[in-house]
Image: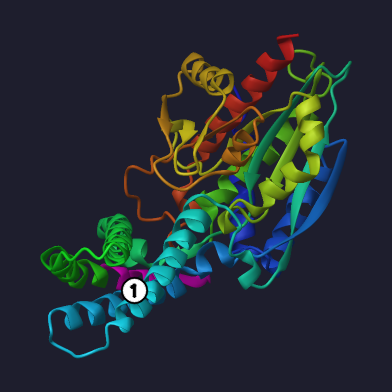
Amino acid sequence: MIDKSFNEYMHKFIEDICNEIGPRESGTEQELQCGNRIEDELKKHCDETHQEEYVSSPHAFLGGIRYSVVLVFIAVTFYWIILLKDLKLIHLEETYNLIFLTLSTILIIVSVSYFILETMKYHEIFDFLFPNKKSKNIIGTINPTDEIKNTVIFSAHHDSAFEFNTFYYLKKFGYVIIFGGYLALGLIFLGIILRLIFLLLLIEFLMLFTILGILYLIFTPILLFYLFFHSYKPVPGAFDNLSAVSVVLGIAKYLSENKSNNEIFPKHTKVHLISFAGEEAGLRGSKRYIKAHYDELITTHTKVVNMDGISHKDQLIIHNKEPGIGVKHDPEIYELLLKIANDLNIKAKLSSLPFGATDGAAFSKKGIPAADFGSMNLKEVVSFYHTRLDTPDVVEKEGLGQALQICLEYLKRIDKSN
């Protein structure tokens, strides 16, 4: 069992950062200040610490949503101009059909590409349109007492998200709006593409495209909510994700205080304790770390246990896949994590991540064995997820302690496997 003083230590770190630094938008001074505080803590317990600076365009991840919605409205307007002409309600030359429909098609393709490639799949396709900013990943290393045979990364992220207005003001309906918006976007995309194909093939199907036009008038207003989907004010981020950062620091502290205990301190496993920047900006920090260390990660057969969002005790969610970004995690890792939780009598279950992605997915996507766990089921609606209510009081100290226990036991079993 972990001494309860560690629970207090971890929770106090969360409170101190929230009170003294506050919200930490990716690529800002507050994010850098938090990174410095994390390194200060790691220095007390690690053999070596350092920061790795990288450059990214953090606003590209969500900043294009409003512009994409505007493009959709313009595309639908062009569609309706053509429809009104076909219905003989306005007079235009025939050549305008192809011009307006081509413009409509281009605009909807750009918009859909942004939503799918940038915000859903986390590709940095549109980043060149947004300003670059500097951020820093924080890395601490603890070396084993004997020959290195394993390498394990325990990771989290210290930036915090922009507030999702739809979640804060609309509660459960906000989730409906998100998925309704994607449905509307898909319907508009298919309709416009189909209309262009029919035009090029000289096929007339006025009734179909009139019905689609009416549906657009019904569903397109849903996209208006996307104009105000998020603010540019970051949330406190106690749960997401100072909670997991505090567990990373708890691992460092516990190992440091038990360095002479052969049953606890690793003999053959090098431990990297990492707090990534830029996760809320589309996994920018973890992706940059992987790119810089890929060969090392592969040759050392590194395993990654990422944590994202620790709140309640006995509510552990171990993610075996993240379909939004298209990855499956390593079964050897997530099955062992589940077994450990069961052995420790901690309630846990395997689940896929219903939307979004974690830093763990960035590793799995590149073929580096990884898994992720937290203690919030995103299939359920909680008031503090990406809202101003994400304050230290939503994080249970016992939940932090259970996460720490699982990580330490995982390290112990990996170390003894050789």
Is any atom of residue 104 visible in this view? yes
Which is more toward the observer, 114 or 392?
114
Is any atom of residue 235 visible in this view? no
| Residue sticking out furthest to the front | 202
- Residue 288 is situated, as x and y percent measured from the top left of the image, at 72, 49
- Residue 158 is situated, as x and y percent measured from the top left of the image, at 64, 53
> Is the residue 328 above or below the residue 212 in the image?
above
SS at circle 1: helix
Residue 227 in magenta stretch: yes
Q: Which residue is mark 1?
A: 101
> Is the residue 186 above or below the residue 286 in the image?
below
Which is more toward the observer, 362 or 243?
362
Q: Residue at x 65, y 65 (%)?
A: 57
Q: Indicate left or right for 117 with 190 as reference.
A: right
Q: Which residues are magenta?
A: 222-233
Q: Residue at x 76, y 34 (%)?
A: 272
Q: Quadrant of residue 43?
A: top right
| Residue sticking out furthest to the bottom | 91
